[in-house]
Amino acid sequence: MTDTDRSVDGESTDPGDSGPLSDDVGPEDVPEFGDLSIPQRAFVAAAQNPSRGLLVVGLFAFALAFYAAFWLSFPRAAGLLSALALIVAAVAAVVYWLLDRVSR
């Protein structure tokens, strides 16, 4: 059955047609947004607003191209700034991990 063969008035009795949610799924079974992982959150955000998702992907591509050009033009400065960024990211990860342990 293709999409064009499906009934649009909701009166179809074919079980392949989409219908209301089953009674087995309750509101408590739906995960909270805070329980999702970072990639799952990004997917939900992109699904809710596709134009913003495309904008973020475009900005990420521009940043990656800028970073590559920076490495090609100024390799010492790019190396120094990359090392500093890695140190800051490591410190942020340790602080996040400690705060996560304290909050439990």
Image (tube, rainbow, N blue to C red):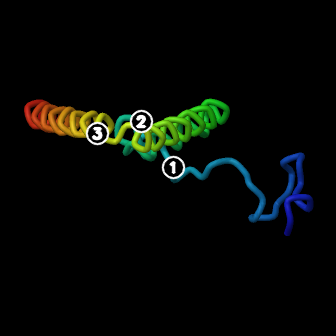
The amino acid type of the residue labelled 2 equals Phe
Above or below for 16 versus 91: below
With 59 as the anchor, is 78 left or right in this view? left
Which residue lies under the disc numbered 1? 25
Above or below for 4 versus 69: below
Identify the mark nearer the N-term, 3 or 1.
1
- Few, some or many residues within 10 Å of mark 2 (<14, 14–19, 20+): few
The amino acid type of the residue labelled 1 equals Val
Which residue lies under the disc numbered 2? 33
User: Looking at the image, is mark 2 or mark 1 nearer the viewer?
Assistant: 2
Percent across and percent down for residue 94 are 13, 37
User: Looking at the image, is mark 2 or mark 3 nearer the viewer?
Assistant: 3
Quarter-of-image position of residue 59: top right
Identify the mark nearer the N-term, 2 or 1.
1
Q: Which mark is residue 79?
A: none
Which residue lies under the disc numbered 3? 76
Q: CA distance from mark 2 to mark 3?
A: 42 Å
The amino acid type of the residue labelled 3 equals Arg
